[in-house]
Image: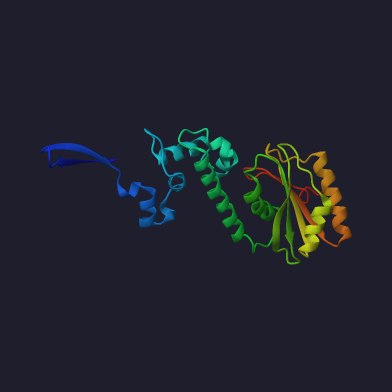
Amino acid sequence: MEAEIEKNSLAGTRTLKLHTAEDDRPREKALKHGFDALSNAELMAIVIGSGTPGESVVDLCQRILNDNGQKLGEIARMGVKGLTKYKGIGPVKAIELMAALQLSRRYQKERLQEVVITSSDDAYNYLRNEMEHLEHEEIWIMMLNRAKKVIACKRMSMGGTTAAVGDIKMILRELIDRLADGVILAHNHPSDNPRPSTQDDNLTERLQAACRAVDVQMLDHIIVCRGGKYYSYLDSGRM
């Protein structure tokens, strides 16, 4: 804040006028210096729009970031319900912020479309953009051509906090329709424990057998967790 003495021409008195420097306002700062110059809190503030009496929108957004370890992924996991717990963020603002985060993920996905998958690290880094923020389990398939380039990546099922059911017939139909040469199965563990369950093992074995029948190579099964943690069936010598 800067203070400016302003003369009241009618009363002949001077009053103290408070205003915010232009560079401190996110929209003006973005126009002047570009979006790269804005912090995460300032970018969020543009989406949310306004704060509350006694707390600016930038301070509100910074507080949300602080509460979530400065991680946008953690904020995404809060969902609309979690965000509305903050005073000043109603359902509309929460939905707008979640929409912005989803656009960011889709933009990142577009950038990865030409990626060649050569290792479990490549697969995890591709998949984590879609999956690590989730609070429930989902099953995805990454379809590849003969050169190991990603053809498509698609969610096949959603479950609860502990399990999702994989439909082998639906997965096979997707692989055949896309003329995929290879597939990487993936699901997430919201608990962030990458250890596979018996159910995970059974799904892996069933899909392996089904892929052999249609001449598609099952390359790996990745269990996605946050913070760079994952489990690879291939790396563990189980495929």
Q: Residue 83 placed where, x, y %?
A: 53, 37
Residue found at the far left of this picture = 12
Instruction: Name the one closer to the observer, 56 or 74.
Output: 56
Q: Is residue 54 above or below residue 92?
A: above
Q: Position of residue 170 (x, y in %)?
A: 80, 53
Residue at (59, 52) in percent of width and height: 105
Residue name at image x 45 percent, y 36 percent: 88
Whether residue 10 sits left or right of residue 168 in the image: it is left
Q: Position of residue 167 (x, y in %)?
A: 81, 49
For residue 52, what is the image quadrant? top left
Residue at position x 64%, y 62% from top? 113
How many numbered marks, from 0 up?
0
Asked if one can make out residue 118 in the rendered structure from this viewpoint, the answer is no
Residue at 70 percent across and 56 percent down: it is 153
Residue 111: name its quadrant.
bottom right
State left or right for residue 163 relative to residue 215. Answer: left
**Scheme of image coloration:** rainbow
